Image (cartoon, helix red, strand yellow):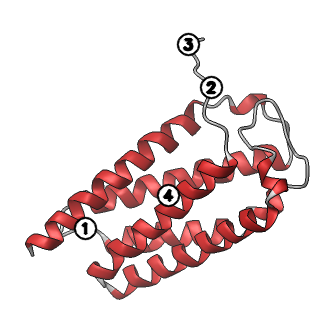
Amino acid sequence: MRATAIWLGMLFVGVLVFTAGVVPAESKHDHAKLPPGPIRDRHELMEAQGQNAKNINQAFEMGSEGFDTGIVQREAQAIADSSQRIPGLFPKGSLNPNSRALPAIWEHWDKFEQLAKQLQQQAMSLSSAAGNGDAEDLHDKAKKMFDTCKACHDQFRAPEKDKGK
């Protein structure tokens, strides 16, 4: 039980760091400056996925004995469902000064597409584990899914510009 509590603590810190870096940054973005179409649509999808991630994090905050697997299942399934749309929202060259998408997406399209598919598979796996109530497996699957989000953002998304400058 002590190992589970330690693992939950580590997972919580990792997810908290992820959501602190992603969710607030996305919510500060000026949505109105994005053109209609795939650039705005992908921004909305990523905001929704960030909210799903935040909800998963909050479900884990309920403690090792009582976290809500139903929330994890539902939110992970939402990420899985939306992840399949990611490649279609990045038509070649769809850059905009108000978007954080990097040209590396199209230079390394196979890797980008692979990460989107990996996210979908990992989110489905997390949702399934939550549905089965497999708490030990759930933590590992959540970490893998969040690591995939981070890997894609690190390679294909520009850092947020400092609003104070």
Give the CA distance from mark 2 to mark 3: 9 Å
Which mark sits nearer the N-terminus, 2 or 1?
A: 1
Residue under label 3, please give it: 164
Give the amino acid at mark 1.
Phe
Which mark sits nearer the N-terminus, 1 or 4?
A: 4
Query: In the displayed structure, would residue 134 be above or below residue 19?
Result: below
Give the amino acid at mark 3.
Gly
Give the amino acid at mark 4.
Asn
Q: Which mark is residue 13?
A: none
Query: Label 4: few (<14), some or many (≥20) within 10 Å?
Result: many
8 sits left or right of 79 in the view: left
Give the CA distance from mark 2 to mark 1: 36 Å
- The answer to whether the residue labelled 3 contacts the one labelled 1, judged by CB atoms less than 8 Å apart, is no
Residue under label 4, please give it: 52
Which quarter of the picture shows residue 10?
bottom left
Residue under label 2, please give it: 161
